[in-house]
Image: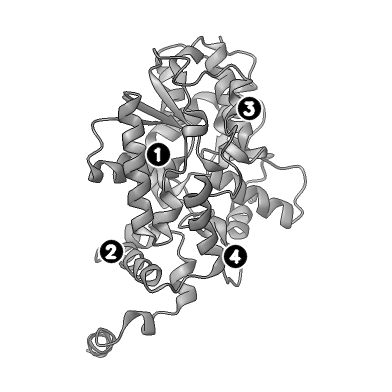
Amino acid sequence: MHTCMHANKATTHNPLEVLNKDELWSCTTCAACTYSCPVSVRHLEIIMDLRRTMAELGEIDKNKTAVFQSVSRVGNAMSVSNINRHKWLTDLGVESVDQNQNYKYLLWVGCLSSFDERLRKPLEAFVSVLKNVGKLSEIAILGDAETCCGDPVRKLGEEGLFQEIVLRNIELFEKYEVNSILTTCPHCYNTFKNDYPDFSMRNVEVIHHTEFLSKLFENGVLDLKTVSGMFVIHDPCYLTRYNGLTDMLKNLTDKIGGGRRPKHHGEGTFCCGGGGGNYWYEVSEKKRISHERVEQLLELKTKNIVTFCPYCDGMLYDAIQTKEVTGVEVLDIAEIIASDASIR
């Protein structure tokens, strides 16, 4: 009875007066609350509505505003020029959509992998695998024409700018007759797969690079021996809880062997702390989510942490550096596969 009365009282107030604003902006949109709620409360939808309200009211701090301005001005969330965005990929032999008009898959690189030199390594490894199995000619990139997918903008409440981005990208996909999008970023993957169809994007297949690698194994194109040394696996929220790829990720890592899973894994994975736009600003926390996750992963006493997401990669790497942990690397699954000499 007391609970019901308290709930009724709360609903008479402006939710922005009831909910602390730091709490609102600390959400990583990992969806663990919604996934585990026994009465199916849609917490995340409420939070996103409130963030949109904050954006409409102009109650956004300079760090979040900087993300909007960067995406609007230069086409990416990294606040750097978009010119020669993918030159490093062309240097690796990847052709543009204008050069390779018979491509099967548009390789969508994403903001982090385009501009962060350390986070380019997973994509470099993936390209190396494609070269080794004779499939490099099946992909093509947009080059300077690629811009943000819109995920950080929408997660930070700027719905109008997000929709502008969506419509512009859909027009680009239609221009180049894109039928399949291949990406290493779960955030881009989720946005294209689950958000863009609401804006009349025609039937475009969206593939995460782990799904592509898994198919290569299934078709006998890839054949790896067990990887020497153990590694612990960090499952990204946007692949498991959001898109149900848990079994596929487990099957993929089982194929190369050596993988161990922490207590929180699969649909019950523990967030890296980088979702919901949190990657782009400081969150007031008693303890960083990324630090807590690294501690969980290191309990398994393995040399490497393997993940499937540039956001997770960046957050976990930063936590390891801050905590001054030595002898541990954060690697993408493509880096593990590319380093194995038994690739055919």
Q: State the separation of the CA atoms marked 4 and 1.
A: 25 Å
Residue at 32% in and 35% down:
171
Closer to the N terminus: mark 4 or mark 2? 2
Q: Is residue 231 above or below residue 344?
A: below
Residue 173 x %, y %: 34, 30
Mark nearer the N terminus (3 vs 1) = 3
Instruction: Give, as a three-letter code, the residue at label 1.
Output: Tyr
Which residue is identified by label 4?
282
Nearest to viewer (mark 3 / mark 1): 3
Q: Which image quarter: residue 132?
A: top right
- The structure residue drawn at horizontal position 30% and vertical position 63%, both measured from the top left corner, is 45
Q: Eyeballing the image, is 136 above or below 62?
A: above
Mark number displayed over residue 189: 1
* Coloration of the structure image: one colour
Q: Position of residue 96 (x, y in %)?
A: 49, 21
Q: Which residue type does callout 2 highlight?
A: Arg
Task: Give left or right: position of 43 versus 232.
Answer: left
Disc 3 to disc 4, how far (Cα)? 30 Å
Say which element carries label 3.
helix
Q: Which residue is mark 3?
A: 88
Q: Secondary structure at mark 4?
A: loop
Q: Earlier in the sequence, mark 1 or mark 2?
A: 2
Q: Which residue is mark 2?
A: 42
Q: Few, some or many C-alpha atoms within 10 Å of disc 1 (few <14, some 14-19, many ≥20)?
A: many
N-terminal of the two: label 4 or label 1?
A: 1
Q: Is residue 273 visible?
A: no
Mark toward the start of the polypeptide (3 vs 4): 3
Q: Amino acid at mark 3?
A: Trp
The secondary element bearing badge 1 is classed as helix
In the rendered image, residue 146, in percent from the top left (x then y), is placed at 47, 35
Q: Nearer the viewer, residue 231 or 149?
A: 149
